[in-house]
Structure formats: structure tokens, C-alpha cells
Amino acid sequence: MGTVVQLKNRINNSYSDLKTAVEDKLVLVEEKIKTKLSSKVELVDKMTKYHLRTGGKKLRALLTLQSAKLCGYSKGTRDVNLAACVELIHAATLMHDDVIDNGEIRRGKKTLNRIWGNQSSILVGDYILSRCFEMMVDDGDQEILKLLSSTSAEISQGEVLQLQHKGEIDMLEETYLKIISAKTASLFSAATKVGSILANKENKIKEALEFYGKNLGLTFQIADDALDYNSELTLFGKEIGNDFYEGKITLPIILLYQKANQEERMKIKQFFRKKERSENEFNQVLILIKKYNIINECYRKAEHFINLASNSLSIFKDTKEKEILKNLTSFSLERSF
């Protein structure tokens, strides 16, 4: 247990170091978001304020701010405005995602759709995206406008791709990676690339940060999907199993189905064919996850993307800003602790 506690402290420190490095700017980002989301329509105002109270790590905004800092951007507030914009894209996609998945809990609180219904949640998500595009236009940089608008389109296509393969128990790992690359990694990639565009860096720098963000995002999502089947996390009071109960096919299930015997495959397939799944069925899957060492296999695959992310930063001089981003790969993989 001592090793786990040490790991927990190291992982938490990497995120804490990032947040501390740009804390003054993050305060401005949060103020900008709060101002931008205010509405004269009572229900819109109530729902956006509720969303803001649910918190979140603001990781994508932090990545934009830190990438800009790494690239030497120091004058003006464009980094604040665009970090807020990136975070708003994420907020809107979460609202839409919860409607699609019939999600009821996010960040330990009831989802917007559970309280106010699907129709209002979709419209408020659209409202947030509209505010985001206003901010992009106000910034005036065509490269950034093109990047963030194309990223929004890519996220939507990732959602559709996931819907297209819903319940596909024998989904190819390649398909899974396409889905998470669009749904998650694309916004991480955009967040880090924006920083280099702000600082007017050459293409090789932009490409390096874009590559870093993409692979960090892939690591983040693989780890997130593995978390949901990691029974050891119950030791820390973390609830697991949401993806299973929602019927999502993620990497742990894909790998498990590949390794399971014929009888076990039939059992897994039956679970995911059902409209609802029980706690007993989830526990049966956890036993198989442990039997075939699936969590470690997920982390092994994620480490490949960690190495790619870390190596992409070699183009930069050794600075505190670079070290913070490099250390963040550990947080992305094992932040569960």
C-alpha cells in the first residue's frame, strides 16, 4: 500500500505543478467562462451556473496556457480567451455526451439532462458552442478558427462513430482508437497547438505540440476507460462500472473478449446485449478482467502513447515549462490514484 500512496502523491504533484504554473491565468479563464455563459434566459443561466459548480480539472485550458508559456507567449490575454474557448468546447461535448449515453452522474453530481431533460441539455450545449465560436471570431486568427472549428467537427464525428459501433462486442482495437482519437485526443491536440500558434512559432514546433497533445489525449482516455474496471480503486472510495452499466464497449472489454474462452465470450456478449446490466454481472466481468490481467494490458498499451508524447517534447530546450508538460504524461496514465 505504501507504494500506491507514493505513486498517488507523485501523480497528484504533476497536475498540481501544472496548475500552479499558470494559476493566475486560470483564475482569469474561469472568470471569462462565467461572464461568457451568463444569459438573460433564466433556464439557460441556471443550467450553465449549475455546470460551473460541478467543477472539473480544467485540464484542456491548463494545457493551452502552459503550451503558450512554453512557447514564450507572455503579452496580452489571447491565451486566456482561447483557453476558455477550448474548455467551453469540452463542456458542450460533455452535455451532448450525457444525453447520448443517458448519463445520470458526472463529477459526483446529477447531470443536466437528468435534472432538466434531454432537450434543454442539447440546446444549452449548443448555446455554449455558439458562445465559443463568438470568442474565436473575436480573436480573429484564421488558423486558430480553422483548428478549433475542425476539432469540433471531429469530436462530433467521433460521437457518431461510437454510436455506429455501439454494442459491438468484437469491435476492432483500431476502431476503438479511431473513436477516442476523434472524441478525446483531438481536443487535447488542439489545446496544445493553440499555444504555439499564439506565439507565432514555426511549423515544426506547432506539429510537435499537436503530436504531444494527441498522444496525451489517447493516454488519458485509455486510462479513463481502464479505471472503470479497476477493482483496486474501490480502496480509494472511487465508484467504478459506469461504462459497463451504460453498455459502452471500451478497451478493457475489447481486450477481454479477445482473450476469453468460448464460454466466457458468450457470457460477455449476453451481458452487453441486454438493455440493463446488474451489479452481479459487473462483478463477473471484474473476475474475468483480473483473470486475464486486462488492466495491466491497457496500461501497457497506453505507455506506448506516453512515450510518443514525451519524445515529441525533445524539440524544446530543457526548461521548467517543458518539465511540467513531460511529467503530466504520468498524471494522464495513473491519475486514478
Image (spheres, rainbow, N blue to C red):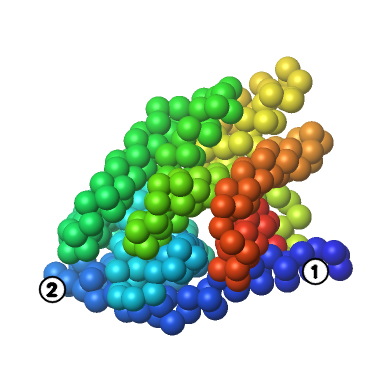
> Could you tell me which residue is drawn at 26 percent across and 46 percent down?
146
92 vs 249, nearest the viewer: 92
Query: From what the image shows, is residue 232 above or below residue 281?
Result: below
Q: Quadrant of the N terminus?
A: bottom right
Name the spot of residue 248 as percent of width and height, x first: 52, 38
Q: Which mark is residue 217?
A: none
Query: Which residue: 30% across, 69% down?
Result: 78
Nearer-N-terminus badge (2/1): 1
Image height check: is 89 above or below 160?
Answer: below
Name the amino acid, label 1.
Gln
Q: Nearer the viewer, residue 96 or 150?
A: 150
What's the amino acid at mark 2?
Lys
Q: Nearer the viewer, mark 2 or mark 1?
A: 1
Element at label 2: loop
281 left or right, relative to 68: right
- Spot occupied by residue 16 in the image (x, y as percentages of width and height): 60, 73
How many numbered circles does the render carry? 2
Please give left or right for residue 7 compared with residue 255 in the image.
Answer: right
Residue wearing tag 2: 40
Q: Position of residue 162 (x, y in %)?
A: 43, 34
Q: Nearer the viewer, residue 308 or 208?
A: 208
Q: Is residue 8 visible?
A: yes
Considering every residue shown, the one lying at the far right of the view is 2
Q: Which residue is mark 1?
A: 6
35 on left or right of 324: left
| Quadrant housing residue 29 | bottom left
Residue 30 x/y as whole percent: 36, 75
